[in-house]
Image: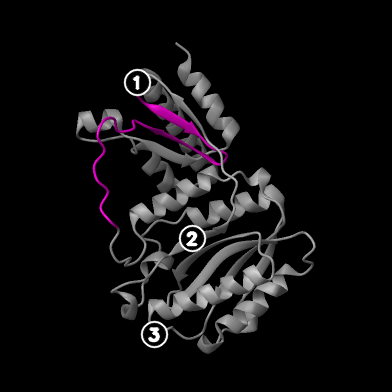
């Protein structure tokens, strides 16, 4: 039976597999961003309840001057930094690795401290400079800014989940890391999540897909993004009719909008 799942920051429509599930192959060595990794990150962002995030949030982009010779060197630097954040009382954190045009990695992310931590931005900056010191990070090259409540969180997650695998910051893997990049994103601590699944009939599933596509097209046109609009118009097309009938969708969408679209789709 088709299912529409409404989440705080997004919505999915799919036809779950029934019966015996295929065995999931073990993940091999990570060699950069993949379509699957990007989709898993987006799905994680969909379900986080931003209204339940407590503490003071800070978003960061942390850089180094020199390229760590291997992915394990970079992972060690990241883990040292996260250990220091835990020592400072970090409530929760999220991180992802991308690359500059010159092939040197940088760390995007956010961290939440208890309310009594006054200058979290300086705490983040100081500990990164210490953790990554061997790679010569510059003080002025580190960007840390407060996340102001729910709106700040929503802006952060929208920005860092929109990029696909072809974006230069995700595709520009250093040659020395081609054999393995290690994990490229992760969450630390407790992130409140919720979702609401609705089993629907096939006609409702099809109507909902069309309504969601229409809403997405309106958003693309309003932003003046012609490439996005062209992609949205054709997103449900498939030369295989059987596959087209069951094609799933997932998109960032305000929860109240997703509910209204589902209500409209259920009207007979």
Tell me the quarter of the image containing the C terminus. Answer: top left
Image disc number at residue 54: none
* Residue identified by numbered label 2: 186
Residue 24 position, x and y percent, is 27, 48
Q: Secondary structure at mark 3?
A: loop
Q: CA distance from mark 3 to mark 1?
A: 52 Å
Q: Residue 61: horizontal and vertical position, in percent?
A: 58, 69
For the residues carrying marks 2 and 1, which lies nearer the camera in this image? 2
Earlier-in-chain disc, 2 versus 3: 3
Vertical comparison of 103 with 230: above or below: below
Quadrant of residue 171 within the rendered picture: bottom left
Marks 3/1 in contact by CB < 8 Å: the verdict is: no
User: Mark 2 or mark 1, which has the lower sequence index?
Assistant: 2
Between marks 2 and 3 in the image, the one whose residue lies nearer the viewer: 2
Instruction: Report the span colored magenta.
Output: 1-26
Which residue shows up at 66% across the image and 71% down it?
87
Give the image quarter of residue 177.
bottom left
Residue 65 location (% of width, % of height): 51, 84
* Quarter placement of the N terminus: top left
How far is mark 2 from mark 1, CA to CA?
35 Å
Q: 209 or 24: which is nearer to us?
A: 24
Mark before the other along the chain sequence, 3 or 1: 3
**Is the Cβ of the residue at disc 2 closer than 8 Å to that at disc 1?**
no
Pointer 2 and pointer 3: residues touching (CB < 8 Å)? no
Q: Would you place residue 149 above or below residue 77 in this image? A: above
Q: Which mark is residue 69?
A: 3
Q: Which residue is mark 1?
A: 202
Instruction: Give percent across and percent down for residue 249.
Output: 39, 37
Q: Residue at x 58, y 72 (%)?
A: 83
Task: Name the residue located 55 percent from the left edge and 82 percent from the top edge.
Answer: 132
- Looking at this view, is 70 or 24 the one in front? 24
134 sits left or right of 226 in the view: right
């Amino acid at each position: 039976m088709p299912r529409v799942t409404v989440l705080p920051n997004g919505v999915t429509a799919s036809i779950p597999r029934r019966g015996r599930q295929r065995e999931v192959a073990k993940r091999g060595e990570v060699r950069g961003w993949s379509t699957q990794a990007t989709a898993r990150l987006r799905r994680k962002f969909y379900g986080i309840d931003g209204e339940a995030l407590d503490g003071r949030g800070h978003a960061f982009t942390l850089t180094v001057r020199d390229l760590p010779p291997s992915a394990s060197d970079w992972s060690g630097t990241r883990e040292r930094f996260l250990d220091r954040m835990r020592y400072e009382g970090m409530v929760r954190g999220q991180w992802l690795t991308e690359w500059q045009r010159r092939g040197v990695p940088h760390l995007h992310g956010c961290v939440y401290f208890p309310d009594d931590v006054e200058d979290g931005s300086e705490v983040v900056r100081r500990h990164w400079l210490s953790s990554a010191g061997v790679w010569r990070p510059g003080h002025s090259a580190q960007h840390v800014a407060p996340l102001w409540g729910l709106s700040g969180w929503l802006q952060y997650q929208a920005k860092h989940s929109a990029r696909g695998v072809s974006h230069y910051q995700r595709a520009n893997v250093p040659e020395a890391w081609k054999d393995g990049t290690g994990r490229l994103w992760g969450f630390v601590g407790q992130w409140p999540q919720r979702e609401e699944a609705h089993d629907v009939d096939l006609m409702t599933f099809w109507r909902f897909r069309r309504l969601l596509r229409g809403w997405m097209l309106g958003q693309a046109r309003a932003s003046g993004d012609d490439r996005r609009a062209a992609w949205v118009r054709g997103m449900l097309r498939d030369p295989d009719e059987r596959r087209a009938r069951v094609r799933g969708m997932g998109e960032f969408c305000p929860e109240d909008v997703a509910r209204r679209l589902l209500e409209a789709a259920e009207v007979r």
